[in-house]
Amino acid sequence: MASAAPRPKSRDLGAALTGLVLGGSTLFLLMLTIVWLTNRHFEGKKASEAAATAPAAAAPPTTH
């Protein structure tokens, strides 16, 4: 009976590091995009609220 030689342990460190870097970069860009879009959304809301209240605040009080 012939026994098979044991296989050497395969260490694919390059693929693991590539996956780690690409995965981390993708998550970072995804989070950056979400923050950018959220800030842009609320900037627009703040500007529209300021424009809606500006004419009332800009009117001079009448003194009689």
Image (cartoon, grey):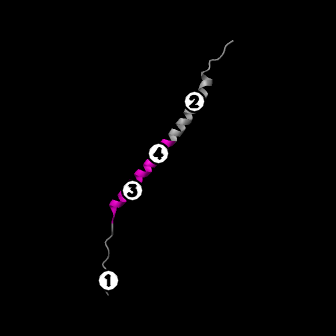
Q: Which residues are magenta?
A: 11-37
Q: Could you tell me which quadrant the C terminus lies in?
A: top right
Reading the image, the residue beneath label 2 is 50
Element class at badge 3: helix
Distance from disc 1 to disc 4, alpha carbons, whole Å, reads: 56 Å
Is disc 2 surrounded by few (<14), some (14 to 19) or many (20+) residues within 10 Å? few
Determine whether 60 is above or below 41 in the image: above
Residue 33 rendering spot, x and y as whole percentages: 46, 45
- Specify whether residue 23 is painted magenta: yes
Reading the image, the residue beneath label 1 is 3
Left or right of residue 5: residue 46: right
Give, as a three-letter code, the residue at label 4: Thr
Residue at x-position 32% and y-position 74%:
7
Residue at x-position 31% and y-position 72%:
8
Reading the image, the residue beneath label 4 is 33
Reading the image, the residue beneath label 3 is 20
Residue at x-position 30% and y-position 78%:
5
Left or right of residue 23: residue 44: right
- What secondary structure is the stretch in magenta mostly built from? helix
| Nearer to us: label 4 or label 3 | 4
Element class at badge 4: helix
Give, as a three-letter code, the residue at label 1: Ser
Residue at x-position 55% and y-position 32%:
47
Earlier along the polypeptide chain: callout 4 or callout 3? 3
Residue sticking out furthest to the bottom:
1
| Nearer to us: label 2 or label 3 | 2
Element class at badge 1: loop
Distance from disc 2 to disc 3, alpha carbons, whole Å, reads: 45 Å
